[in-house]
Image (tube, rainbow, N blue to C red):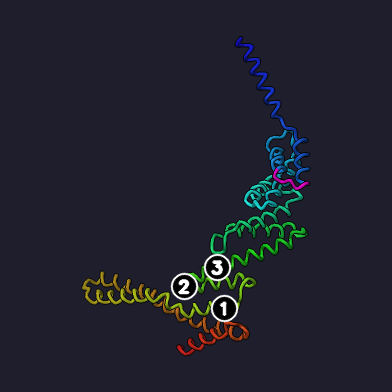
Amino acid sequence: MKRILIVIFAGALLFSCAEKTIKKEEVMSKALKLYQKGEYDDAKEYFKKAIYKAENMTTTDIMKARYYLGNIYYMEENYVDAIVEFEEFLSLFPTAPQVPEILYKLADSYMKISPSPDRDLTYIRKAIEKAEEIIDSYPDSIYVSKAKKIIEKARKIEATHIIGIADLYEHLGKHYSAALYYNLVYDDYPDQIEKDFIEYKIAYNLANAGKQYEEEIDQYTEKIKKLENKINEEKDIEKKNVLINRKKLLEEHLNRLKERIQKSKKRAVSILKHAVENYPDSKHKKDMEDLLKKLQKEG
């Protein structure tokens, strides 16, 4: 009896496995028909079956199924899943004819899921990377012009991000640091900014660089005074020399800060003169002129 049951169970198991066998001809044909009709939800499930379950799938079959599956995610604006599918496609089929199209859709998807400019730029940089790959590797592709537009938009976001950092430093009273970031965006993103405004911002923050170092200068000045008193009181020559050397280091740092402030003001004057001359119609012209007069008066 036990032997009969085992035979029956084995037969049932074989029958069950046979039932689960999926032929590629059935699922791929069905998937493509559904895709062409625009019935993407159902098509998506059939493409998944073709990729992960169907027998006798060739490399070309899998390539086609992954291409259409990624496209469905992209058209559904499910950009995260589209990215996963397209990245997998590129890793498996790096020389496929669809690569330029997929690189463009990847770049566009990364742009779509990127957060606001005040947050992380990882996805923006990914978008630029994919778009640049189209331009560099497929210069004759119809997607080159679209790739250039993505790069332009992405760089605008990068510029806005850097300006946000500069603005934050300015509001925190870290004017020299703010000037460095405004200068960075001026040098690296000339086509994505209002140059007259950024020049004014660089000059304004350089002119006020001293405010960033007021507290530090006061601290170093106080430390130097205390060291001078200790030096005068110290009788041991060796210890006195140690104090003198320490005082010298502090004075050198203090002088560097003061020199930085003076150079910043001179540079601010130079930038303002250039801005006033080159942007006669700027809405910031009066602010530029007022700041320039103030700095020239201070000498």
Q: Please name the residue shown 26% across and 72% down the image.
A: 240
**From where the camera sits, is residue 271 visible?**
yes
The quarter of the rendered structure image containing the N terminus is top right
Q: Residues within 10 Å of mark 3 (few under 14, many from 20)?
A: many
Q: What segment is highlighted magenta in the picture?
A: 37-41
Decide: marks 3, 2 in contact (CB < 8 A)?
no
- Is 39 placed above or below 263 here? above
Indicate which disc, 3 or 2, sits on the residue closer to the N terminus: 3
Decide: marks 3, 1 in contact (CB < 8 A)?
no
For residue 211, side relative to residue 66 (left or right):
left
Please tell me the numbered disc located at residue 199.
Answer: 1
Question: Would you name the residue on which mark 2 appears?
Answer: 171
Residue at mark 1 to residue at mark 2: CA–CA distance:
18 Å
Circle 3 sits in a helix, a strand or a loop, which is it?
A: helix
Residue 28 location, x and y as percent? 76, 39
Q: Please name the residue shown 48% across and 86% down the image.
A: 295
Q: What amino acid type is highlighted by mark number 3?
A: Ile
Q: Is the stretch drawn in magenta largely helix, strand or loop?
A: helix
Q: Please name the residue shown 67% across and 25% down the image.
A: 16
Circle 1 sits in a helix, a strand or a loop, which is it?
A: helix
- Is 73 placed above or below 14 here? below
- Whether residue 184 is in magenta: the answer is no
- Whether residue 38 is in magenta: the answer is yes
Q: Quadrant of residue 272?
A: bottom right
Q: What amino acid type is highlighted by mark number 2?
A: His
For residue 179, side relative to residue 245 (left or right):
right
Question: Would you name the residue on which mark 3 appears?
Answer: 162
- Is 64 placed above or below 144 here? above
**Given this view, does label 1 or label 2 mark the residue nearer the observer?**
2
For residue 100, side relative to residue 161 (left or right):
right
Residue at mark 3 to residue at mark 2: CA–CA distance:
14 Å
For residue 297, side relative to residue 58 (left or right):
left
